[in-house]
Each structure stands twice: as C-alpha cells, then as structure tokens.
Amino acid sequence: MTSRPAAAQQLGDLARLRRVRDRIDREYAQPLDVEALARDAHMSAGHFSRQFRAAYGESPYSYVMTRRIERAMALLRRGDLSVTEVCFEVGCSSLGTFSSRFTELVGMPPSAYRREQAEATVGMPPCVAKQVTRPVRNREAQPAQRR
C-alpha cells in the first residue's frame, strides 16, 4: 500500500512528465536534450529518463525522434522538400542519423517513402492521414490487429 505523501509525489511526477512530453510535442524541431528536459521536470537526468520510460514506454530521446520522424513523414508526403531539407526542418542535425532512425521506424529509407507515399493520402482528411501513417516503434511487438 502506498502512503499518501508517496502517492501525491507520484502524481506530481506524472504531471511534470506530462508537461515535458507536451513540450516535446510542441518543440520537437528545437534542440532538446535530456538534461534540459529533466530540469523542466525538476528531476535528475537519470531519474527523469527512468520515469519517462516507465510512463510512456520509450526513452525521452526515442520519443523526440519518433515525433520528428512523424512530422518528417508528413513533409515527405507533401513532396515539395528534399530529404535533406526535411531532415533539418524537423530538427535533426545529421542526415545519417535521421535516415537511419527513419528507416528503423518506418521500414524504408526516407527517399523511398517520399517516392511511394507522395500520392497515398491525397484527398484524405489530415486527422485520418496522421493516424494511418503514424510510425510505430517495435512493430514486431505490436498485436496483429494494429499492423
């Protein structure tokens, strides 16, 4: 059984983690490092990383990269920016890291995705396009109905 002060502390930690996650969602293209995010949550970097992973199922860095790749997918589908331009637009500073992470999450390199998906969501409402094209980390671990 958890004591009231411990339960209150846990709820406070979750609220701070949610605020940091919301910041990541808003500022994904800005330089974000774990130390700065941890300071926002009033936690040490190690404690913040452990708590973030426990709450959201992935490390803060992975969460940032997933948001960046998600936005990159939308920009690549538009087709008016090169892969390099998209890389920098979403806040990545290394084309190699961007391409590797994109391929890991999406299952194909960004250039191939751009070619194949440019017309895939034409006429689809943006809210539906975002849902059906959302990158899924650890696709093999997902239940079959979500693939």
Image: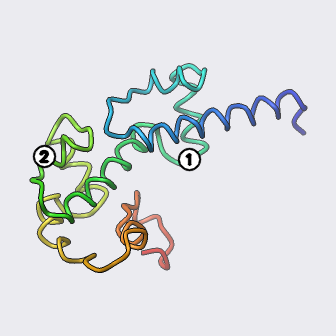
Image-based side of 34 in relation to 95, left or right: right
Image-based side of 96 in relation to 138, left or right: left
At x 37% / y 49%, what residue is drawn? 66
Disc 2 marks a residue whose amino acid type is Glu
Disc 1 marks a residue whose amino acid type is Tyr
At x 30% / y 52%, what residue is drawn? 69
Label 1 Cα crowd, 10 Å radius (few <14 / some 14-19 / many 20+):
few
Q: Where's the C terminus, which quadrant? A: bottom left
Q: Position of residue 39 (x, y in %)?
A: 53, 20
Label 2 Cα crowd, 10 Å radius (few <14 / some 14-19 / many 20+):
some
Q: Position of residue 6 (x, y in %)?
A: 82, 29
20 vs 120: above or below: above
37 vs 144: above or below: above
Q: Which mark is residue 85?
A: 2
Residue to which mark 1 is pinned: 56
User: Is the residue under label 2 in contact with that under label 1 (CB below 8 Å)?
Assistant: no
Counting every numbered tag in the picture gives 2
Q: Position of residue 123 (x, y in %)?
A: 29, 80
1 vs 69: above or below: above
Element assignment for label 2: helix
Image-based side of 133 in relation to 58, left or right: left
Picture quarter containing residue 124?
bottom left
Q: Where's the N terminus, which quadrant? A: top right
